[in-house]
Image (spheres, rainbow, N blue to C red):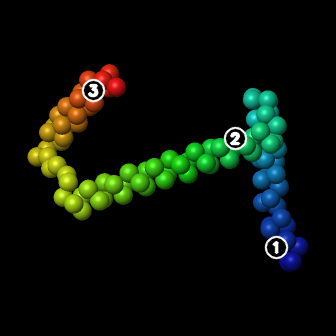
Amino acid sequence: MRCAKLTAIVRPSAPLFARRRRIGSSLQFQFGKNASEVMREGLRLVENREVEEAALGAAAQLGVSALDRGEFKEFADASSLVAHLNRIGDEAISGAGDT
């Protein structure tokens, strides 16, 4: 009985190692990268995600603060919102060449 439990615990790691080898081989074949390059790229992706999440968090906090101060606009329906967004988008685009 103990052997069956041990086998069940050890077995799941075998496919994990196979997956790691397959991913490593695939990356090296497709991109010519070695393990350290893949790790550096992975770290860059994680860092980029952290920066994006921090920016989204800051933007959300700005939005919540504006709501708390009563700085928001209400719209009667979706078409009014779309018209407003189109108008401010057009204004932003037309003013983009000013700088």
Residue 5 is marked as: 1
Q: Could you say where residue 96 lies in the image, as x and y percent from the top left?
A: 32, 26
- Residue sitting at the far front: 99
Side (left or right) of 90 relative to 36: left
Q: Along the polypeptide, which appears first: circle 1 or circle 2?
A: 1
Q: In which quarter of the image is the N terminus?
A: bottom right
Q: Is residue 93 above or below residue 23?
A: above
Q: From the viewer's side, name the closer residue of 58 and 23.
A: 58
For badge 3, the amino acid type reads: Gly
Residue 76 is marked as: none
| Alpha carbon distance from label 2 to label 3 | 37 Å
Task: State yes or no: discs 2 and 3 in contact (Cβ < 8 Å).
Answer: no
Q: Name the residue under label 3.
A: 95
Q: Could you say where residue 3 lies in the image, as x and y percent from the top left?
A: 88, 73
Picture quadrant where residue 61 is located: bottom left
Q: In this view, does 87 lie above or below 52?
A: above
For badge 2, the amino acid type reads: Glu
